[in-house]
Amino acid sequence: MIYLLDTDGAQREISPLPQSISSHFESQESLSACRRDSLWGKALLCYVLGNKLAVKDFTVISRRNEKPFLKTGEICFNLSHSGSYVALAVGKSEVGVDVQVKVPYKERVARRYFTESERRFIEESPDQNEAFLRLWVMKESILKKEGSGLSGGLATYDFSAFADENSFTAYGYHFSLFPLSGAMLCHCGEESETGTENINRKELEKFIENERGT
């Protein structure tokens, strides 16, 4: 499942997070050092686990250069944020999700991270920015599913054959793309996803405020 939050218009700072939320994270030092948009992601994770999935007792383990995971291991998750968007993917097996706001296509970036056939697809596309964005989130989502991040090598995978598709299977995984307003989201998992569940920002703010009072 994919949960999508748009923080656009947020007027208030959410740092520090309430103790009842931050206590779910093993490393409090790394939590306090996180950027503001990452704190939205952590609040979203706690809200979804507790209110949507009825997981009340959980601990998030985050170790250097490793993908965060739940101590119980019963649910897998992955977070991504870009611009005002925060995306959370959850599943019974490892998942990867990437959301990225539209950015101008840069040939030097493509030469470093994209294969020759992918660069050709971008150059021949009527909208190079859109083509670049689609390929980028595909690559990021599979690396995040496998827990390797950019160190795993974006150029390791070639998605030129699927660049126009919103749902496909490649490298043994299912990929689902969702065009957003000014952005693109891609989910990579054992099963395909058909949509996202939008989380209202005010609803999440209310959850955070209620947690401050506990």
Image (tube, rainbow, N blue to C red):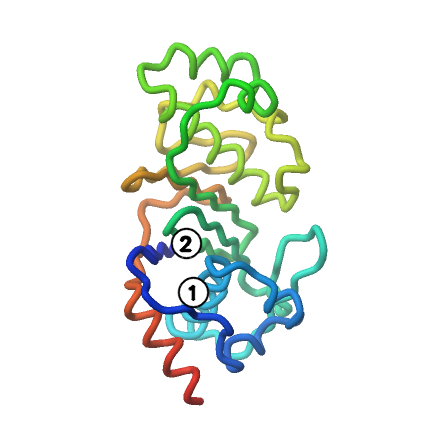
Provide the secondary structure element on which disc 2 rests: strand
Q: Residues within 10 Å of mark 2 (few under 14, many from 20)?
A: many
Left or right, 69 with reference to 100: right
x%, y% of residue 162?
A: 43, 23
Nearest to the observer: residue 161 or residue 125: 125
In the rendered structure, which amino acid carries the disc numbered 2? Val
Q: Residue at x 51, y 82 (%)?
A: 20
Name which residue lies at 51% across and 74% down: 16
Residue at horizontal 63 percent and vertical 53 percent from the top: 67
Looking at the rendered structure, the kind of residue marked 1 is Leu
Q: Which mark is residue 44?
A: 1
Label 2 near label 1: C-beta < 8 Å? yes
Give residue 6's position: percent from left, percent from top. Answer: 33, 55
Note whether 117 is above or below 180 in the view shown. Answer: above
Residue 113 vertical position relative to residue 184 in the rendered view, above or below = above
Measured Cα–Cα span from mark 1 to mark 2 = 8 Å
